[in-house]
C-alpha cells in the first residue's frame, strides 16, 4: 500500500513532463535525502512503475554493485541495454547493434589494462551515446552515496568530476538519486566548490507524520485500538520500516513493555538491529577516528551537553571533540540545538545507544525507568525538537531567498528584491514570516510551516487574508491536502512549496 509522498510524486511527474517536452535544464535533476529505511527506495520504485509507459527506465541500487568500478559499469550498461531491447541474457546475447558491442569491448579492454579512470569516463560517454541514439532515459540511482566509494581506488580519484562533466552533456537523461546520509549530500550539492553544485534539487524524505502513520498501521491491522495505534506511532517515530515490522506483533490492549523487551532491549530484536545497522553504517562513513564513540557516549548519557563539557569529561582536547561532533552530525546521528548543546537525533535511538554502551546487566535499571510514561516523554521530546527545527528552518529559508534572487528556487523564478524582512507585522498585527518588495514595487510574502502534519485549505486561506500582495509563497515541511491544490493550482499569485 503506497501511503504519503503525494507531493514528491507530483513534483517528479512535473519534472518528467518538462523532461519529455524538452523544457529541460541540468539543474532539474533530483536528489531524495533521508535516513535509512524511511521509504526512499519504495518511493523511487513506485514512481518508476508509474512512468514506464512514458520513458525508458534505468534503476540501479548501487549498494548491491559497489564491489568494483568494473562490476558497476557492467551492470549500469546492462540496465541501459535492458531498457532498449527488453531481452534476457548478457550484453552479447541482447545486442544486435555492432557499434554498441564495439564500444563495450573497448571499455572491457581499458579495465583489463587497469585504466580505470578512462574506462569509467567511457562508460558515461557510452550511455550519452545510447541516449542520443535511442531516446530519453529516466535513470534512478538508489543509495547514491556508494557511488562515491569508488574514490578509494587510486586510479579513480576524480569520479565526481567524471560524473559531472558527462551529466552536463546528457540532454536525454533525467537523474533521480537517493542518499542515506542527508547532511553529507546537502554539503556536497550546496557547496559552490563541489563538482555537483547546482545540478540537483533536494527533497528531504522524513518519517511519516501521525496521520499517515495511522493509515499505514490500520492497513496492516484492523483490530487495533486507538491507544495501540498511538503506541506504535511513538515507538516507531513514524518510521515506515519499523511500523511494518512492529504492527503485526503488538498485543491488542496491552502496554508497550512486551514489544520493547522483545525488539529494543534485546540484541536479536528488530529495533535493536535496525539501529545497530544505522550506527555501523554511519561510523563506516567516518573511519579512523577512535574518539567518535567516546564523544557519542557522552552525548547519549546527557540530556543535552556542550562541547566544553564533553572535552572535560573524557579529557580530550576541545578541537578533537569538535571534529568528532562535526563528523557525527554529518552522518545525522546527533544535532546541535539553538542552546548550543548536542543531542541524539532520535529519542528511541538514544535508548538503543544506552543499551549498546552499558550492556545487558547494567541496563536493567535504565530500562525500567524508560518504560515508565514512555509515550509522554516521547511526545515532549518530539515537540521540543520540532520547535527547534522550525526556528532554525525559518533562518535557512530567509537566507536561501536572499541568495537565490534572479534564480530558479524551488520551482519559482525569484525576482531581485530591494527589501526582505523577516517576522514582518501587518497594520492589523498579523505576523508574516518573510515580507519582500521588488525593485519595481511588487510585493511578495512567504509563510513557513515546519511541522510534520499536512496543510489544510483553511490555513492557506488564512495566510492569504493577512495581507494583499502580488505573490504568496506557502512553504510546508510536509504536504498539502488535495483541496489546496484544487483551489490554487491555477492561481498564478500563489505558489505551494514542500521542503
Image: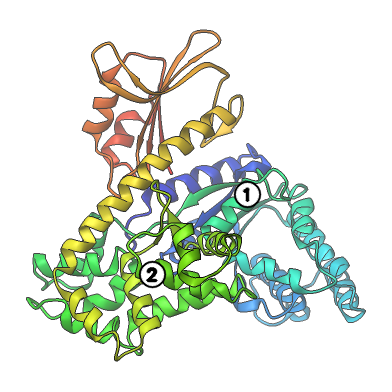
Is residue 478 visible in this depiction of the protein? no
Q: Residue at x 59, y 61 (%)?
A: 323
Instruction: Provide residue 474's location: percent of width, then percent of height.
Output: 37, 32
Q: Mark 1 against mark 2, which lies toward the viewer?
A: 2
SS of the residue under disc 1: helix
* Quadrant housing residue 2: bottom left
* Quadrant housing residue 70: bottom right
On the image, numbered disc 1 is attached to which residue?
189
Tag 1 near tag 2, CB within 8 Å: no
As drawn, 487 above or below 145? above
| Mark 2 crowd level (few <14, some 14–19, many ≥20, 10 Å Cα) | many
Q: Of 318 and 239, which appears nearest the observer? A: 318
On the image, numbered disc 2 is attached to which residue?
300
Q: On the picture, is 242 further left or further right than 179?
A: left
Query: Colour mode?
Result: rainbow
Q: Residue at x 58, y 30 (%)?
A: 404
Q: On the picture, is 491 further left or further right than 72?
A: left
Q: Residue at x 36, y 43 (%)?
A: 390
As drawn, 213 above or below 300? above
First in sequence: mark 1 vs mark 2: 1
Is residue 330 visible in this depiction of the protein? yes
Q: In which quarter of the image is the C terminus?
A: top left
As drawn, 160 above or below 440? below
Q: Which residue lies furthest to the right in this view?
A: 113
Amino acid at each position: 500500500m503506497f501511503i504519503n509522498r503525494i507531493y514528491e510524486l507530483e513534483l517528479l511527474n512535473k519534472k518528467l513532463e518538462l523532461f519529455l517536452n524538452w523544457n529541460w535544464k541540468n539543474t532539474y535533476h533530483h536528489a531524495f535525502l533521508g535516513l535509512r529505511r524511511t521509504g526512499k527506495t519504495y518511493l523511487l520504485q513506485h514512481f518508476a512503475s508509474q512512468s514506464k509507459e512514458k520513458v525508458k527506465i534505468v534503476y540501479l541500487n548501487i549498494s548491491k554493485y559497489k564491489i568494483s568500478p568494473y562490476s558497476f559499469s557492467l551492470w549500469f550498461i546492462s540496465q541501459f541495454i535492458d531498457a532498449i531491447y527488453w531481452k534476457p541474457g548478457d550484453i552479447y546475447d541482447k545486442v544486435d547493434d555492432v557499434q554498441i558491442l564495439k564500444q563495450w569491448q573497448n571499455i572491457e579492454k581499458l579495465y583489463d589494462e587497469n585504466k580505470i579512470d578512462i574506462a569509467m569516463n567511457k562508460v558515461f560517454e557510452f550511455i550519452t551515446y545510447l541516449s542520443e541514439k535511442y531516446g530519453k532515459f529516466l535513470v534512478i540511482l538508489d543509495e547514491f552515496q556508494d557511488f562515491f566509494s569508488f574514490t578509494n581506488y587510486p586510479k579513480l580519484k576524480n569520479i565526481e568530476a567524471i560524473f559531472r562533466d558527462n551529466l552536463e552533456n546528457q540532454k536525454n537523461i533525467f537523474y533521480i538519486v537517493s542518499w542515506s546520509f542527508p547532511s553529507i549530500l546537502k554539503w556536497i550539492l550546496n557547496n559552490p566548490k563541489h563538482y555537483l553544485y547546482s545540478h540537483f534539487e533536494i527533497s528531504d524524505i522524513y518519517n511519516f507524520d501521525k496521520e499517515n502513520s495511522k493509515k499505514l498501521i490500520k492497513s496492516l491491522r484492523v483490530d487495533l485500538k486507538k491507544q495501540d495505534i498511538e503506541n506504535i506511532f511513538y515507538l516507531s517515530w513514524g518510521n515506515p520500516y519499523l511500523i511494518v515490522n512492529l504492527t503485526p506483533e503488538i498485543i491488542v490492549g496491552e502496554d508497550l513493555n512486551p514489544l520493547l523487551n522483545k525488539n529494543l532491549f534485546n540484541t536479536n530484536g528488530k529495533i535493536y538491529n535496525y539501529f545497530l545497522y544505522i550506527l555501523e553504517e554511519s561510523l563506516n562513513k567516518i573511519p579512523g577516528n577512535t574518539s567518535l564513540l567516546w564523544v557519542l557516549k557522552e552525548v547519549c548519557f546527557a540530556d543535552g551537553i556542550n562541547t566544553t563539557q564533553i572535552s572535560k569529561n573524557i579529557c580530550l582536547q576541545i578541537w578533537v571533540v569538535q571534529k568528532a561532533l562535526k563528523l557525527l552530525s554529518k552522518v545525522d546521528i546527533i544535532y546541535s540545538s539553538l542552546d548550543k548543546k548536542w543531542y541524539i537525533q532520535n529519542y528511541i535511538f538514544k535508548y538503543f545507544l544506552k543499551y549498546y554502551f552499558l550492556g545487558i546487566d547494567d541496563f536493567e535499571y535504565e530500562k525500567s525507568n524508560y518504560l515508565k510514561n514512555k509515550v509522554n516523554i516521547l511526545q515532549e521530546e518530539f515537540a521540543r525538537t520540532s520547535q527547534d527545527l522550525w526556528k532554525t528552518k525559518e533562518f535557512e529559508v530567509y537566507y536561501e531567498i536572499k541568495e537565490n534572487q534572479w534564480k530558479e528556487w524551488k520551482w519559482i523564478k525569484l525576482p531581485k528584491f530591494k527589501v526582505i524582512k523577516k517576522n514582518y507585522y501587518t497594520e492589523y498585527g498579523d505576523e508574516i514570516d518573510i515580507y519582500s518588495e521588488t525593485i519595481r514595487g511588487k510585493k511578495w510574502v512567504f509563510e513557513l510551516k515546519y511541522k510534520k502534519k499536512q496543510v489544510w485549505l483553511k490555513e492557506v486561506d488564512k495566510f492569504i487574508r493577512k495581507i494583499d500582495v502580488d505573490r504568496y509563497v506557502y512553504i510546508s515541511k510536509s504536504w498539502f491536502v488535495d483541496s489546496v491544490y484544487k483551489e490554487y493550482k491555477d492561481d498564478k499569485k500563489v505558489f505551494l512549496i514542500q521542503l
